[in-house]
C-alpha cells in the first residue's frame, strides 16, 4: 500500500527556512517514516530570492502570500519560520484552516499570544509542534535518559547558559532588536531554548524566578543606512535564578554579547549521585560524573553519544564516532513530526503548543521579575 503523504508549506526562507528545508529534504532518506513529507510550497517576501531558493531546495511551488497558501486545501502542515511576531497570526490562521502546525521558538512574543495559540490548537484538534530542536541532539536525549534511569538521584542544581557574541555595537538594527517583532532579545531567542532543555531533562517545572535584564547597546546602525542609528528596544542579556518543582535550584543566562562565545549553549546538572555537562559547541559529547562508582574510579567521563546501537537517533545516521552537526537536530525533529503524523511515538517527547506555553510562562515571569526587581511566581502569569 502506498504511504500517505504530508504536503508541507514552509513560511520563511532565510536561516530557519534553510534549516527546515534541509530537514524536509533529507528526513525520508535517513529515517523510515510512516508518512512521506512532500515539499509543496515555500513562502517568503522576496520574489527573486524565493525562486532561486525553491529551486535549490526542491520546493514544488513558491509564493509571497502566506494567507493564500494556508487556505490551499492541498496543504496538510504549515511550518512557521518567520520572525516571532508572526507566529501567532499565522498559526491561528493555519489552525482555523484545519492544518497541523510546526512553529519555530519562542512560541510567541508574549504569554497571552501563546495562550491564544493553545486555545486555537485545542479548538482545531490538529497536532502542533514547536521547533525546540536541541531536545533532539542525541547527547541531550541521552542526558534525559540518564536522569530518567535515576543515575543522578535527586537533582540539586541546574546551571544553564546560552552565550553568543554576534550582538556587538556594529550589528545592525535587524528585527531581532525590535520588541514589536521579536518580543524580547537574547531572552526569547536563547533563554527559550535553555528553559526548554532544563524542563526536558529534569521533568520538573520552574515555579518561581528572579531576573535581571540589560540592554548594553541602546542604539544600532540602521540596516538600510548604516550611517544612521535607531533605538534597540530589547535586552542584550537576561539572567535569572529559578526554583523547580522537584526542589532543584537553577540559574539561566542568555546573552548576545559574551565576547568569544559563538553558540555556547551549555547546561550542567548536579544530583546526589552524579552530574551531567553538555555544551553544544561539542554537541556529540556528553560529560557524566558517576559518584556511585568506587572513589578511586570517580571522574568525569566524556561519552561520545554517537553509537547507532545505543544512543538516541543514531540508528538513522552513521557508524560509531562518525559525528553529526547542527542540521541533524532539525532532521531528527522532522522525523519525529512525521512519525507523530503517522500515528507513531516520537523518540523523545515533542513540545506542542501547550508544552511550549509553560516555557513562555517562565520567560514572561523572568522579564516581569527583572522589571519589578522582585521574585515572581511563574503561575502568577495568567
Ligand atoms: N530553533 C532554532 O535553533 C532557531 C534558530 C534561529 C532562529 N529561530 C527562530 O526561527 C524564526 C525565524 O528566525 P530566522 O533566524 O530564520 O529569521 P530570518 O530573519 O533569517 O528569516 C525570517 C524569514 O521570515 C520571512 N518573513 C518575514 N515576514 C514575512 C511575511 N510577512 N510573510 C512571509 N515571510 C515573511 C523573511 O522573508 C525571512 O525569510 C524566529 O522565530 C527565530 O526565533 C530558531
Image (spheres, rainbow, N blue to C red):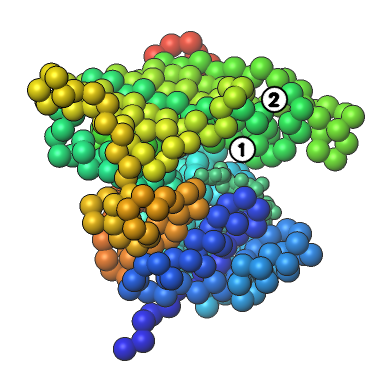
The residue lying toward the viewer, choosing from 203 and 136, is 136
Q: Secondary structure at mark 2?
A: loop
Image position of 371 with respect to 320: above or below: above
Residue at position x 75%, y 62% in the image: 49
11 above or below 168? below
Which residue is drawn at the image coordinates 76% and 33% (left, top)? 172
Residue 146 appears left or right of 209: left
Callout 2: few (<14), some (14-19), or many (20+) C-alpha neighbours within 10 Å?
some
Q: Which residue is mark 2?
A: 168
Instruction: Provide residue 317's location: percent of width, then percent of height.
Output: 37, 60
Q: Is mark 2 within 8 Å of ligand 1?
A: no
**Quadrant occupied by the N terminus:** bottom left
Residue 59 placement: quadrant: bottom right
- Mark 1 closeness class: few <14, some 14–19, many ≥20 residues within 10 Å: many
Report if the beta carbon of the residue with label 1 is closer than 8 angstroms to ligand 1.
Answer: yes
**Which corner quadrant of the image does residue 121 belong to?**
bottom left
Q: Residue at x 59, y 17 (%)?
A: 214
CA–CA distance between discs 1 and 2? Answer: 18 Å
Q: Considering the image in quadrants, where does the C terminus appear?
A: top left
Q: Give the image location of residue 286, x and y in percent.
A: 33, 36
The residue that label 1 is drawn on is: 182
Amino acid at each position: 500500500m502506498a504511504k500517505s503523504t504530508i504536503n508541507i508549506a514552509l513560511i520563511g526562507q532565510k536561516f530557519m527556512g534553510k534549516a527546515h528545508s534541509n530537514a524536509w529534504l533529507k528526513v525520508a532518506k535517513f529515517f523510515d517514516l510512516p508518512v512521506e513529507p512532500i515539499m509543496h510550497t515555500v513562502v517568503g517576501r522576496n520574489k527573486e530570492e524565493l525562486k532561486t531558493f525553491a529551486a535549490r531546495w526542491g520546493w514544488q511551488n513558491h509564493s509571497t502570500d502566506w494567507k493564500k497558501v494556508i487556505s490551499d486545501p492541498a496543504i496538510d502542515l504549515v511550518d512557521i519560520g518567520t520572525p516571532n511576531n508572526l507566529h501567532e497570526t499565522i498559526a491561528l490562521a493555519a489552525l482555523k484552516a484545519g492544518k497541523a502546525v510546526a512553529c519555530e521558538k519562542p512560541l510567541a512574543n508574549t504569554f497571552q499570544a501563546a495562550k491564544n495559540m493553545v486555545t486555537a490548537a485545542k479548538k482545531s484538534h490538529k497536532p502542533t509542534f514547536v521547533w525546540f530542536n536541541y531536545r533532539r541532539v542525541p547527547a541531550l536525549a541521552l542526558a534525559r535518559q540518564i536522569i530518567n534511569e535515576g543515575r543522578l538521584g535527586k537533582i540539586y542544581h541546574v546551571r544553564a547558559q546560552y552565550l553568543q557574541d554576534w550582538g556587538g555595537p556594529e550589528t545592525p538594527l535587524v528585527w531581532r532588536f525590535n520588541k514589536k517583532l521579536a518580543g524580547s532579545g537574547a531572552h526569547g531567542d536563547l533563554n527559550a531554548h535553555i528553559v526548554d532543555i532544563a524542563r526536558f531533562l529534569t521533568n520538573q517545572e520552574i515555579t518561581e524566578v528572579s531576573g535581571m535584564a540589560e540592554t548594553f547597546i541602546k542604539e544600532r546602525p540602521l540596516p538600510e543606512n548604516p550611517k544612521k542609528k535607531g533605538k534597540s528596544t530589547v535586552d542584550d542579556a537576561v539572567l535569572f535564578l529559578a526554583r523547580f518543582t522537584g526542589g532543584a535550584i537553577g540559574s539561566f543566562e542568555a546573552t548576545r554579547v559574551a565576547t568569544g562565545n559563538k553558540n555556547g549553549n551549555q547546561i550542567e546538572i548536579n544530583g546526589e549521585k552524579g552530574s551531567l555537562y553538555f555544551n553544544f559547541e561539542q554537541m556529540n559529547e556528553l560529560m557524566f560524573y558517576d559518584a556511585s562508582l568506587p572513589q578511586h574510579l570517580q571522574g568525569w567521563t566524556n561519552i561520545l553519544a554517537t553509537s547507532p546501537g545505543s544512543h538516541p537517533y543514531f540508528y538513522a545516521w552513521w557508524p560509531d564516532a562518525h559525528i553529526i552537526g547542527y542540521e541533524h537536530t532539525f532532521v531528527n525533529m522532522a522525523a519525529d513530526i512525521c512519525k507523530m503524523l503517522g500515528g507513531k511515538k516520537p523518540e523523545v517527547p515533542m513540545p506542542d503548543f501547550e508544552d511550549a506555553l509553560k516555557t513562555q510562562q517562565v520567560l514572561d515571569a523572568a522579564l516581569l521579575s527583572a522589571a519589578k526587581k522582585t521574585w515572581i511566581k511563574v503561575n502568577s502569569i495568567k
